[in-house]
Image (cartoon, helix red, strand yellow):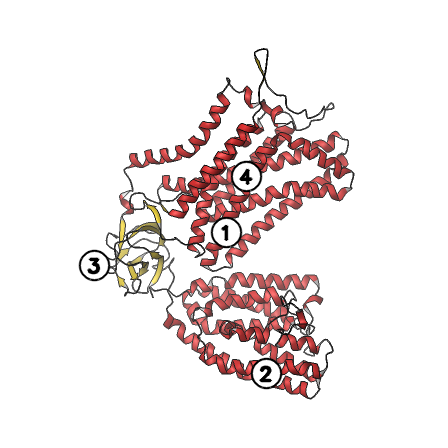
Amino acid sequence: MWDDAFPSFLIGLREGLEAGLIVSILVATLVRSGQKGRLPQVWTGVLAAVALALSFGAVLTFTAANLSGTAQEAFGGALSLIAVAFVTAMVFWMRKSARNLSAQLREKVTAALGMGAGMLVVTSFLAVGREGLETSLFLWTTARSAGEATGPAVGAGTGLVLAAGLCWGLYRRVLKINLTTFFSYTGMVLIVIAAGVLSYGLRDLQEGGVLPGGHAYAFDLSGTLDAGSWYATLVQGVLNLTVTMTWLQVVAYLGYLAAVMTLFVRGLRAAAPKPVAAAGQAVVAQPEQAGETEPGQAVVPEPEQAGGAAAEEGPKGAPTRNRRLLPAALVTVPAVVAGVVIAAGGGKPAAAATVTVSDEKSECGKGFTAPQPGRQTFQMHNAGSKTSEVYLINPATSAVYGEIEGLAPGTTRPLTATIGSGDLAWRCVPTGGDAVTSAAVHVVGGPGGPDAKAVLPVSEDDLKGPLDQYKAYVNSGLADLLTLTRKVQSDVHGGNLDAARADWLTAHLRYSSLGAAYGTFADLDKKINGRADGLPDGVNDKDFTGFHRVEYGLWHNQSAADLTPAADQLTGDVADLVKAFPTQDFDPTDLPLRTHEILENTLQFELSGDTDEGSGSNLATAEANVAGTRELLTVLQPLIQARNPQLLDTVNGGMKRVGDLLAAARHPDGSWTPVQQLDQSARMQLNGATGQLLEDLAPIPDLLEIRKSA
């Protein structure tokens, strides 16, 4: 945990000190100008910036939690690159701005005082908000790379508290710190850390399929080093360097480090005070004066005033040498220390013996002995000629404790699993070959039974029954839909638009209850239920067709003659769908995914009112989506029940809560309250219940993922 805390501690200290200095200067300027009554405006802006940073972190966490495994890798990798860009810009900005920060902020405060209370709030909000957003992003990235949030959170919290204390001491003139030197040295350390974050982010993008070269390894030391050892964990936690790295990671790490560190150090040398020779003496340029202080008042000093100019720290020429030596030390010392420790430790401990992966039964699992219960790390080496998947399983139930996909020939990767008591074996699945299972070993003394931390795998055969049931449900629903849309068509042809409105809603709700099949409807879904958003002419565009086109006409007083072409096309497209659906390929993996995606679209489009073209029926559509999700859960219930019955109970409870809230918006005459007309409390309650239900549904795709170990 503590190795993961250091990068967050440093970012918390540095960002906290930047934000704290800004707030201190704002407060000091107001106090000095006799404007103490305006201080609440500063604190309002500061609190708003803190709230924004916390909300940003929550959005990142929620977004990542609701993505598939591959999408999470791509999302995390992209944000890691953004974090590197922010940190890089931050260290260069503070290197440049530290000397004149106080003067610049005093000018902004003076201008804000002349423009009213709002501008002072905005000034403090913008000044602190940037640091808050950078801290949230970097902390989220660090927590994700660490695999846990405790260490990064403790590190960042410690850094922020220390920064607050330093800022208070500077404000009260009880501390003297050379802030220019502080920001220079911490900037160098952050550049090294950012290089590791860049490397980690690129690896995520490779694993997410965004970048190539995921199996082109520059080195693989997993056969020599124990990835779970304290020294490997320390290097990975602080520098994000791992025992196995691809060529892209190595090139990016070294390239970023060389380029950015060189530019940063050159900038420090260029910004150093230049001596002026006078009568054989070196004269140090004087810093900008911060202004006089009245009795009893204090203004945060300029960096030079806080601790002396850098040129006064030693003999002539020493600062230049220090600036050259420190970056080199930051790069080389971790590598040297790691090498010494590795040499002294004699390599990887015997407890982490390599386990062989092979398509031969006699070789699969070779080197595996009965492990201790609890969390264990195994080094898996592919000794075969084919890329393979490998699973640690309970051979009696095929429940999976841990897995590795895409293990290339000749490479070694760690597999971490939490083990209970019972039998264990390895199942090796080579690409294009048959699965083989090693001999079993028996583990005793583990908590919670043999499969306490294992997942019962799902095969395509397991999903075949639910898929057939759901396809029958969709076929039946499409037959009803065709009858209902023909009734709407008949109403329009007969000029009975009141009946068409009632029949339109019935037909649209039937279509909305088939949400899990939309992926197989292909282009017909866009024709039948597409929206006008993004079309060049909006609702008047020739490509705006289907239910929402008819809805727009029915509730915007278009004539029967105007609506006839749209109603005819809708019925024709539904007829085409009824004919085409039985021949469409329905990917069985779509079923678990749709349990989450149907209501995700409901929250995005229906509960926001974005799809309302005049009928005010968004909540009715949301209820139909809930019914469709419930139908899907019904066919998947046996698979979920066998793997996580508690999850099923939680989901059913959430479904009932959302259903009850939607039912409350339906009037006795069958009409619905438009979502925009819900009172604020009811709307927030409905959105919150739907969001919670989405979180409850999110584990189902992973729980029912098809695994070759099955």
Q: Earlier in the sequence, mark 4 or mark 2?
A: 4
| Label 3 packing within 10 angstroms: few (<14), some (14-19), many (20+) | few
474, 522: nearer the viewer: 522
Disc number placed over residue 12 in the picture, else none: 4
Amino acid on which disc 1 is placed: Ala
Which element is circle 3 on?
Answer: loop
Residue designated by label 3: 362
Quarter placement of the N terminus: top left
Q: Which residue is mark 1?
A: 78
What separation in Å lies between label 3 and label 1 (alpha carbons)?
Answer: 42 Å
Q: Secondary structure at mark 4?
A: helix
Camera-near label (4 vs 1) is: 1
Query: CA–CA distance between discs 3 and 4?
Result: 53 Å
Q: Nearer the viewer, mark 4 or mark 2?
A: 2
Q: Give whichever of discs 4 and 1 has the lower sequence position.
A: 4
> What residue sits 58% from the left and 86% below the top?
483
What amino acid type should be assigned to the residue bearing mark 3?
Ser
